[in-house]
């Protein structure tokens, strides 16, 4: 294979076949211009709390949301670690951090 002018040339038997690349563009939203991550995370965690209220009812919703956001560190902490800490700190039972 070799790349030529944005197109990929592949050898099929003795014929050359022109194949268009699948990815046309990639956007990096490093400053939050396209997506307000803070608002998205708050909305996601609030909805998660509502879905899991049977397991989380002993925790005030605002405390759960606030603590998740603190532990998340704007996405710099792996989510498995965030959930492990939430389960331990809030003593969540009948459910593991992997659920």
Image (cartoon, rainbow, N blue to C red):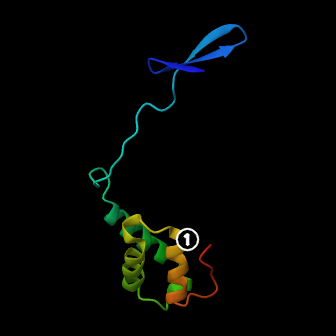
Q: Horizontal placement of 89 versus 94: left or right? A: left
Q: Horizontal placement of 11 versus 41: left or right? A: right
- 48, 75: nearer the viewer: 75
Q: Horizontal placement of 56 versus 98: left or right? A: left
- 58, 78: nearer the viewer: 78
Instruction: Name the spot of residue 8 as percent of width and height, x first.
Output: 54, 20
Instruction: Name the spot of residue 65 as percent of width and height, x first.
Output: 39, 78
Q: Horizontal placement of 53 versus 68: left or right? A: right
Q: Residue at x 39, y 85 (%)?
A: 63
For label 1, the SS is: helix
Mark 1 surroundings within 10 Å by alpha-carbon count, few (fewer than 14), some (14 through 19), many (20 or more):
few
Q: Residue at x 66, y 15 (%)?
A: 11
The answer to whether residue 53 is seen in the rendering is: no
From this viewpoint, which residue is outermost toward the front? 2
| Rendering quarter of residue 35 | bottom left
| Labels in figure, total | 1
Instruction: Name the spot of residue 44 as percent of width and height, x first.
Output: 43, 67
Instruction: Name the spot of residue 94 as percent of width and height, x first.
Output: 64, 86
Quadrant where the C terminus lies? bottom right
- 42, 2: nearer the viewer: 2
Q: Which residue is mark 1?
A: 80
Q: Up-down: is 12 above or below 27? A: above
Q: Residue at x 73, y 11 (%)?
A: 13
The answer to whether residue 27 is seen in the rendering is: yes
Quadrant where the N terminus lies? top right
From this viewpoint, which residue is outermost toward the right? 13
| Rendering quarter of residue 95 | bottom right
């Amino acid at each position: 294979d070799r790349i030529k002018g944005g197109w990929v040339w592949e050898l099929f038997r003795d014929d050359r076949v022109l194949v268009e690349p699948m990815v046309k563009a990639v956007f990096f939203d490093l400053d939050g211009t396209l997506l307000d991550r803070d608002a998205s995370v708050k909305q996601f965690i609030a909805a998660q709390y509502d879905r899991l209220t049977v397991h989380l009812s002993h925790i005030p919703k605002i405390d759960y949301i606030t603590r998740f956001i603190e532990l998340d560190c704007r996405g710099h902490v792996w989510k498995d670690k965030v959930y492990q800490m939430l389960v331990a700190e809030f003593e969540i039972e009948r459910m593991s951090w992997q659920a």
